[in-house]
Structure formats: structure tokens, C-alpha cells
Image (cartoon, rainbow, N blue to C red):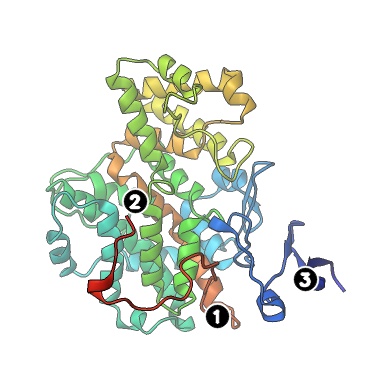
Amino acid sequence: MGKQAKLELDGKTYILPVVVGSEGEHGVDISTLRQTSGLITLDDGYGNTGSCVSKITFIDGDKGILRYRGYPIEELAEKSTFIEAAYLIIYGELPTSAQLKRFSDLLTANEMLHESMKNHFATFPATAHPMAILSSMINAVSCYHPRLIEGYKADMFDVQAARLLSKVRTIAAFAYRVSRGLPAIYPKPSYKYTANFLHMMFSEPYQDYDLKPEVVRALDLIFLLHADHEQNCSTSTVRMIASSQANLFASAAGGVCALWGPLHGGANQAVIEMLEDIHRSGDDGSRFIAAAKDKNSGKRLMGFGHRVYKNYDPRAKIIKAQCDNLLKVLNISDPLLDIAKHLEEAALKDSYFVERKLYPNVDFYSGIIMRAIGIPKEMFTVIFAIGRMPGWIANYKEIVDHQGTRIYRPRQIYTGETERHFVSLNQRKSKA
């Protein structure tokens, strides 16, 4: 018999099994608690609730560890690519040469959008946020593939996964072009995943975008570092939708909507907006650092610290080196980037931030990289969504592959009015 926990209430004892993960994590299994006792647990925001058992990603926030399918993020960032990591996350193992070629060929075969979809893009106003377009068009593209609407089909999964992962970058690039009043640029089969996205974003009909290797590598690394991150808000949303047996595209569109929230996917955009505010005030960052240490100032240092990592975000260490290299290669003169460097140096030396473990996180550096590349800040969360797609696909697959999955249905503790009876309109009195 494995480990057990005991819950005592009103003289009764309830035995609860303890689940132990492969990395030694312990969780009290309360799946039968309501059935045996009539009780439920209350965990506002699910901060202490394990919503599932998963084999995809492991995080140890205290030690600053992130692993995809057991592989340290540091090794993948150094030796792998986004597409290879995407295959690993979705299928559980690093691909062989033949498997990687087949996966890449599927991505190429599914990179085009149906030509009539251009009409859908044209109906959005120029002020439409790219995330609104992205979520809408992910759902729309599924309409052109009727078997998707039928739900999960094991024999079609490889094609469906490649179709979503490939088309999402085409949708994102088209959304950007429409927002700028620019003509759509079609993907090139000869380009690899990230290079093709940059081509569709920045090329013109008369001149191809200059694909600098350092720029391609920097964006590919951003995609890779965001490919999965355990049960965050958007991934949990994807699993919630998938549990209803909704199709892959509908589940991913829901993930986009969850990611859109400024408390989730908008952090790197908030970094740039903070830098813009500092620049407009005529500050080099020094006054802002001082204000950020004053609780009454209302100033907050964006892009520093992380809810999960109580140590240095392992992704931040990786992306910082890439950021420094890219800025050096591009030789960009940008006052906002100068302010960012000043904030980084000051915060890493200041005991106030060091003692509170408020280190620069991945959002701080990714925002700087994307600005240097020329990606506008309203597209930052879209870039995040493209990168996170493998994780959403993998989590969707875990749900549909598990035979015992029931539709997710959290409980609640009701705190409203107790039973009362209808009062006619002429007899009602205001409580004000």
C-alpha cells in the first residue's frame, strides 16, 4: 500500500491516497472525497491544486528547473530547434531523421491558407487586435477541414497537429500585414519554420526580407523557450475545452483567448510599455528603480520575478545571452534598449531586488529581442501563442488519449442568498 493522508472532521476520518510523481512530487488524491464525505476542497485560483497527471513538462520553481519530456531546457536551447522540440513535446521522444523530415514535410504541406480566407481577414477593422484575429481565424480555418469538426480521430492526429502548428504562423503573419494595410506574403516551401514566418511578416512583393541567421535563431529560441510551461492559465484552458471533446482547433482558439490576458501573455508587452513610459519621463531608469522600491509609488518593475520560479528563471539565462548577441550583431541604437540594459544592471546589483529574488525573467528579454527585430508590441502575445502551440497540442492529446477522461467540472462554495421567493414588481424595495 502506498502513502496515505488522513482528513479528520467532526469525529470522522477519511483516508486519502497520496500520488507520487516521477520527480518525487507528492499530491493528495481527493478525487473520491466528495463521494465518501460530501466535502469538497476550496482553492481559489487553483494555486495548490493538481488538475491532472501529465508526462509533458516538469518545473521546479525553487531550483529553477524546466524540462520538456525530461530534457533540460538548457540542452534543448543549445542543441535543438523549435520544430524538433515541438515534435518532442507532442510525441514524447526526440525525432529520428526520418521522423523529423516527415514532420517538417507535413508542416510545409499545410502552411497555406485557403484563398477565400483572405476575405475573412479583410472584414476585421484596422484597429483589431492581432490576438482577436488569431483566435477567430484558428476557428475559421477548421471550417475548411470538415473532419476537424468531427472531433479527435487518431488516424488524423498527425495531420491535424501539423496543420495547426503550421497555419498558426501564416494566420499571425497575415493578421500583421492586414493591420498595416500591406499585401499578404505567401509562405515559401524552401524556408524552414521560423524563417518562413519572418519572410511572411517582413518581405515585400518586390523584395524578400533579409533573413539574418542571428535574427532567425533568436526568434526560434523564443518559440522554443515558450513551447510549454506546465499547467498555466492557457494550457489549463485548452485541457478544459478538450475534456468536452471539442476539436483541436477550438481548444487552441480558447488557449489563445486565455493567453491574451495581460496577466498571462501580455507581460513582455508590458515591459516595452514600461520602458516607453520611462523614456517619455526623461529618466534613464534610475528614478524608476528608486520608485519601484517604494511601495507607495505605484511603480512596478515589469519583467522581473516570476510566480513559479523563486530562483532565476532558467529561460531568462538562456535568452539573455541571445539578446546580448543579437543587439551586438544588429548594432541598434534605441533609447529604450539602453534603458532596459540600465534597469537590468541596476536590479542585478541592488540588494533590494536580489534579496527578493526579483531577477529579470524571460518576458524582459523576449520583449527586447522582438523590438530589436522590428516586431510591434501588439504582436508580442501572438509570438507567445505560436511558441506555446506545441504544448497546447500535447496537452490536448493527453486528454483525448486518456480513456477515463471526463468533462472537467469544478465545484464551488456557494455564498449567495439562501432560498427566497419571488416578489412582484410593485412590491419591491431598493436595498440601497
Q: Position of residue 314 (x, y in %)?
A: 59, 40
Q: Depth check: 91 or 204 in front? A: 91
Amino acid type assigned to the residue bearing label 1 in the image: Arg
Would you place residue 70 above or below residue 31 in this image?
Answer: above
- Circle on res. 344: none
Work out how far the residue at label 3 is from the one at label 1, CA to CA, in angstroms: 21 Å
Residue placed at 52% from the left, 74% from the top? 408
Other residues around mark 2 within 10 Å, as few (<14) / some (14–19) / many (≥20): many
Q: Secondary structure at mark 1?
A: loop
> Left or right: 358 with respect to 64?
left
Other residues around mark 3 within 10 Å, as few (<14) / some (14–19) / many (≥20): some
Residue placed at 31% from the left, 26% from the top? 277
Work out how far the residue at label 2 is from the one at label 1, CA to CA, in angstroms: 31 Å
Would you place residue 357 above or below residue 315 in this image?
Answer: above
Q: Depth check: 79 or 253 in front? A: 253
Q: Which residue is mark 3?
A: 16
Upstream in sequence: badge 3 or badge 2: 3
- Circle on res. 406: 1
Amino acid type assigned to the residue bearing label 2 in the image: Val
Q: Depth check: 222 or 196 in front? A: 222
Upstream in sequence: badge 2 or badge 1: 2
Amino acid type assigned to the residue bearing label 3 in the image: Leu
